[in-house]
Every structure is written in C-alpha cells, then in structure tokens.
Image (cartoon, rainbow, N blue to C red):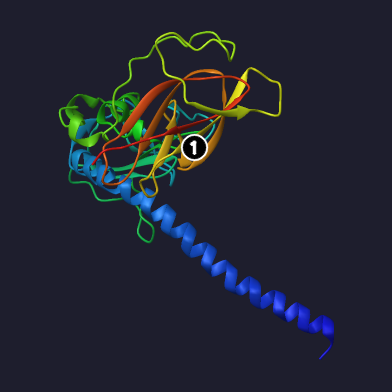
Amino acid sequence: MSKRTIQISISIATICLILPALAVFGQERRLTYENWYGDVKKTLADHYTGKTVKLKMAIPATRRGLELVDGSLDRAAAAPSTETLAQSGDEVTIQSFIVRDTDIELLVNKNGEKPKGWFFPKKPRIKLRFSRELTAKDMTIETINRWLSPAMDVTALGSTQQASVAPPTPVVKETPAPPVAKSSEPSAGLPTPTILNDLATSDANYGELTVECPGKYARIYIDDAYSGFAPRTIRLRAGVHSILVMADGHSAWEQRLFIPGGKASVVKAQPTR
C-alpha cells in the first residue's frame, strides 16, 4: 500500500469520526431550542384545533391551498384554476394546527364533508409563510389571529388564553430610538455595559457586545430577534438596544442598554429561577 493511499485512508477515517460528533452536538443544541417551544406549540395547537370559523377567502383545490406570505395573499403562487375546496363564507373546522420555523399550517374541513381524491386526497389548507424565522414574540394568539384575519373571521378564535400561551417575555413599550450618540456620551437614564477595550476599527457608529449567561443553552434576543446562544459576541449599531436572555428553568432576563460605538463591551445576564 502506497504512502498516499494510507494518508487518504486516515483522512477518511478522521472525517467519519468527526461528522457524527458534530451531528450529535448540533442535534442536542437544536433539540433543546425546539423543546423550549414545544409546550408553546402544543398550547397553540390545543387552542386552535376544533374551532369553527367562517372563511373570508376561497381555498384553491391545490396541494398548497391558500397561502399568505407575511400576512398578505401570495397571488403569484395562487392556482390559475377556479376549482376550490372551500368558498368564501363557508364555515370550516380547524382539523390541525402546525407551527414550523418559518410557517404555520392549518388543515380545515367543511363539517361532514370528506376530503376530495382517493390516493392522495386534497385537504383544504391555509398556510402562513414568512420571510424570516418565527420568534418567541410571535407565539401569541393575538399575533397569529392578526395574520389569519385576511383569510377568516377570527372572532371565534379569541385571545383569552394568550397569557398562558405567550412565553415569559416581558412586554417592552415601543419608544423611538434615540440618535446615535458618541461613545463618550452615554444615553441619559440607561445603563452602559462594561467596557472591555477599544475596537481596532475607528467606526464610532458600531460597537461589539458580548452577552454572557451562566444558564446552559441560554437564548439571546436582540431587539426581539433571536441571536443565538450565550456566550455570544454581536456587532450592533451604537445606541439603545433591548437585550433579552432566556434559559430553561429560569425566568426571563431583559434590559435596555446603551451600546457605545467603537468599544468592545460585555454584559452578564443573571436569569433567576
């Protein structure tokens, strides 16, 4: 056996050992993240499944059904055929409610009507698709009802259970963002994270924030957008930002901070049990 053949064999063996380890690690992190949403998704499914609503729009007789993208009808994806599985004004019952990373799908059925088709029966469905990944702030009945309102009358869907469905995320009142301030002028009334050092670049419009948290797989949300697991360093525009950290078994930790430009800073989140 030649020397080159031995080297190739060793490289292949190394890759075979590394890939499963990376897959297990990635799966463990993802499962932890998904399991956190599991109870919320189940509560939402229990709330919507079995509800009877009146349609505002017809559902095409296609596999994709009625699709709304970011809350608006996707006319480009609509079937040219006039055949429908349900008409505007029909009363339908929600058979299933499924939340995924970037879409929410509802299977509905007119009372007493069997699905059309034999081998792969066509089921009327409504699909909400999004150009971004859904976050914890989206998982409320009020928000989902607003997205569904163009397709159906959401009066029967209510929002009385919203408090039990929404994750333990403090509600932050929306306020206009202040203009970018110089790094030497902290925003009045707001704390500044601990400054570590000056950044190599001289751009005072951006700063770097490192978020640390003792909790395992603590999730970071910057201005309501999911930003990964702690510890993590994020490049942010200088100014005021909302930092939310959520860890399993702990209450949510949230703080509004002034991020100085041209500086590397750190904040240590301390969620409580």
For numbered disc 1, what is the local secondary structure?
loop
In this rendering, position of residue 111 left or right of residue 59: left
- The residue at the point 37 percent across, 45 percent down is 214
Q: Position of residue 258 (x, y in %)?
A: 48, 18
- The residue at the point 43 percent across, 53 percent down is 30
Q: Is residue 186 visible?
A: yes
- The residue at the point 54 percent across, 63 percent down is 22
In this rendering, position of residue 89 left or right of residue 33: left
Type of the residue with mark 1: Ala
Q: Nearer the viewer, residue 97 or 193?
A: 193
The C terminus: image quadrant: top left
State whether residue 204 is above or below residue 233.
above
The N terminus: image quadrant: bottom right
Task: Please tell me in which quadrant of the rendered image residue 255 appears.
Answer: top left
Identify the residue under disc 1: 79
Q: Position of residue 171 (x, y in %)?
A: 29, 22
Q: Nearer the viewer, residue 238 or 137?
A: 238
Task: Please tell me in which quadrant of the rendered image residue 28 appears.
Answer: bottom left
Q: Which residue, as the protein is rendered here, is positioned at the far bottom? A: 1
Q: Is residue 96 visible?
A: no
Q: Badge 1 local density, few (<14 within 10 Å), some, or many (20+)?
A: some
State whether residue 141 is above or below residue 21.
above
- The residue at the point 55 percent across, 33 percent down is 234
Q: Which residue, as the protein is rendered here, is positioned at the far left? A: 160
Q: Position of residue 58 (x, y in %)?
A: 35, 31
